[in-house]
Amino acid sequence: MAAEAEHPAVPIRITVNGRKHEALVEPRTLLVYFLREHLGLTGTHVGCDTSQCGACTVHLNGRAVKSCTILAVQANGADVKTIEGVANGDNFHPVQEGFREKHGLQCGYCTPGMIMTAV
């Protein structure tokens, strides 16, 4: 049996950073991969794949969640904010500015998740 027949694509509607999107996704697609691969929002990182590190943190309906633990189909109809949606135009969010000003970046890989947890 073909993989397509085993896992038929499911339609979802999702608002990400204020923009509405409609897409067909495999039921097993994690939200983090939908954001990165389907929408090109690569600021949300995959760090550990075990829900421990927080590099994949986004806001789902106003709550900080680890997007590696949520299926894209579970976010159907939801409002999602990623690190790309935190700044106001060219102006950093105050938390982003604080990280920049105090050099709280470490290597930078987990920084988006830290910021999304803090805002």
Image: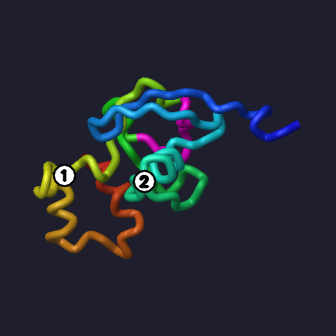
At which x and y percent is residue 25? 58, 36
Residue 62 magenta-drawn? no
Q: Which quadrant would residue 22 be assigned to in this image?
A: top left
* Lateral position of residue 12 relative to residue 108, left or right: right
Q: Secondary structure at mark 2?
A: loop
Q: Quadrant of the N terminus?
A: top right
First in sequence: mark 2 vs mark 1: 2
Q: Secondary structure at mark 1?
A: loop
| Callout 2 amino acid | Gly
At which x and y percent is residue 87? 19, 52
* 39 vs 22: above or below: below
Q: Which residues are magenta?
A: 65-73
Q: Residue at x 56, y 34 (%)?
A: 24
Residue ranking furthest to the top = 77
Q: Nearer the viewer, residue 68 or 34?
A: 34
* Lateral position of residue 9 relative to residue 87, left or right: right
Q: Nearer the viewer, residue 15 or 119?
A: 15
Q: Residue at x 31, y 33 (%)?
A: 62
At which x and y percent is residue 12? 50, 28
Mark number, residue 87: 1
